[in-house]
């Protein structure tokens, strides 16, 4: 176990050192080209377990927070009902009142079917609005909310799928007028499609579960904060990953997981001084078109002659994939230690961070906590940096056992 842990941490160290060796002249001419969407709070990791493992979760062991990561896992839950409650502080080093509150859970209908639910509320604290002359015109507490449910079903002993629906509400201004335009709350309806495969195998004579997961989340209509036709994509996201969980002996268990994430929304193109697109594709497209377009619309890099550098488009598309990896160790199914790493390319936001955490599990409930350390050196500091967060999980189905 010690050798495996050392190897995992060594891989993280090499990965991180490579990510810091940046030649900015080779990155889109030194320019960032991040993909932005409305309601990014939908992508915040809500639970401390996955948060301590570098934000992996699409193929990890099913739990009460699976509604966020992969609802298809819910039909593999062993207990009949469970609830997870999390509070995630945000920018705590700057302001004290921004946080994400999350409640997720599930209910097993039978051995093959389960339903899931979630409620997330994101509070942005107190905001004071002023006019052009600096006069106070109002005070408001911006907030965003998402309410969702899912149905998960096993299609075989090892494979399951799920469909989800979600209502999204985002009120950032409280109806204030901005630039002579009256603002409104943004609203959207979105859905997820997910799948989960897990197979018991044997590695070196040890009982092992090999799992794969896929989740396409937040497929929904664009959001607008005014009565005009200007609308923004919500964070439609493709998440793929795998997990290997091995029972070392009767008391020790180890898991290794890796996730790949890509936003399925258009990439910003490159424009000339006249506002004409010189590389990339028009981002003002429909939802389905934008999802398919996202796999090949990166603008790449333009040379001094105004020609796209060969291979730069594919290279930039690969940079749009975020990678996270995590490790989890359990002793006697009661005490857990976790660690992980998250990597985002410098031109796409530059978030890079290490995560740590632990958990304690009893018969009916479990308590998890996580801690994040930002390792980015280009300004991509995570808002959760140096912040501890907690999740309380209730396995209500275990009360009668």
Image (tube, grey):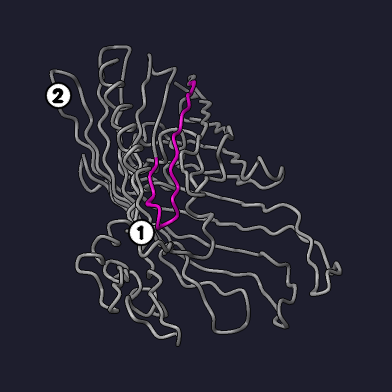
Image height check: is 389 above or below 241? above
Nearer to us in this view, 396 or 323: 323
- The percent coordinates of residue 381 (x first, y second) are 52, 45
The reply to whether discs 1 and 2 touch (Cβ–Cβ < 8 Å) is no
Query: Label 2: which residue?
Result: 203
Residue 293 in magenta? no
Image quadrant occupied by the N terminus: top left
Residue ID at (30%, 21%): 6
Residue span colored magenta: 342-360
- The percent coordinates of residue 310 (x first, y second) are 19, 69
Give residue 25's mark.
1
- The percent coordinates of residue 274 (x first, y second) are 45, 87
Dot 1 crowding, Cα within 10 Å, few <14, some 14–19, many 20+? few
Q: How far apart are marks 1 and 2 (CA)?
A: 46 Å
Q: Along the polypeptide, which appears first: circle 1 or circle 2?
A: 1
Q: Quadrant of residue 201?
A: top left
Image height check: is 327 above or below 280? above
Q: Residue furthest top?
A: 250
Q: Judge depth for marks 1 and 2 and give the one in front.
A: 1
Residue ID at (36%, 31%): 78
């Amino acid at each position: 176990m010690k050798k495996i842990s050392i190897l995992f941490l060594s891989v993280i160290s090499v990965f991180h050192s490579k990510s810091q060796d940046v030649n900015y002249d080779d990155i889109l001419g030194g320019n960032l080209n991040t993909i932005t969407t409305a309601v990014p709070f939908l992508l915040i990791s809500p639970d401390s377990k996955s948060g301590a493992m570098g934000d992996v979760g699409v193929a990890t062991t099913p739990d009460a927070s699976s509604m966020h990561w992969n609802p298809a896992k819910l039909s593999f839950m062993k207990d009949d009902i469970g609830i997870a409650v999390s509070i995630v502080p945000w920018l705590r080093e700057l302001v004290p009142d921004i946080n994400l509150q999350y409640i997720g859970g599930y209910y097993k209908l039978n051995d093959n079917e389960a339903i899931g639910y979630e409620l997330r509320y994101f509070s942005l604290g107190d905001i004071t609005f002023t006019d052009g002359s600096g006069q106070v015109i109002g005070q408001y507490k911006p907030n965003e909310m998402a309410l969702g449910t899912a149905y998960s079903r096993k299609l075989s002993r090892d494979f399951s799928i799920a469909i989800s629906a979600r209502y999204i509400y985002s009120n950032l201004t409280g109806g204030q007028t901005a630039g002579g335009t009256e603002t409104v709350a943004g609203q959207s309806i979105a859905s997820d499609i997910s799948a989960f495969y897990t197979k018991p195998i044997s590695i070196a004579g040890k009982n092992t579960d090999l799992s794969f997961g896929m989740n396409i989340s937040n497929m929904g209509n664009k959001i607008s904060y005014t009565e005009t036709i200007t609308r923004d994509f919500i964070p439609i996201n493709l998440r793929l990953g795998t997990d290997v969980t091995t029972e070392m002996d009767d008391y020790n268990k180890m898991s290794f997981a890796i996730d790949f994430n890509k936003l399925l929304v258009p990439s910003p193109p490159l424009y000339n001084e006249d506002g004409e697109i010189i590389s990339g594709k028009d981002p003002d497209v429909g939802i389905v078109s934008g999802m398919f377009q996202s796999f090949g619309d990166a603008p790449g890099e333009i040379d001094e002659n105004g020609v796209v550098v060969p291979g730069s488009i594919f290279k930039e598309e690969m940079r749009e994939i975020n990678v996270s990896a995590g490790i989890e160790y359990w002793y006697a199914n009661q005490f857990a230690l976790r660690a992980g790493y998250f990597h985002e390319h410098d031109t796409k936001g530059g978030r890079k961070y290490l995560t740590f955490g632990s958990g304690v599990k009893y018969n009916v409930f479990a308590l998890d906590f996580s801690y994040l350390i930002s390792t980015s050196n280009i300004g991509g500091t995570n808002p959760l940096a140096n912040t501890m967060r907690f999740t309380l999980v209730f396995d209500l189905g275990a009360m009668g056992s």
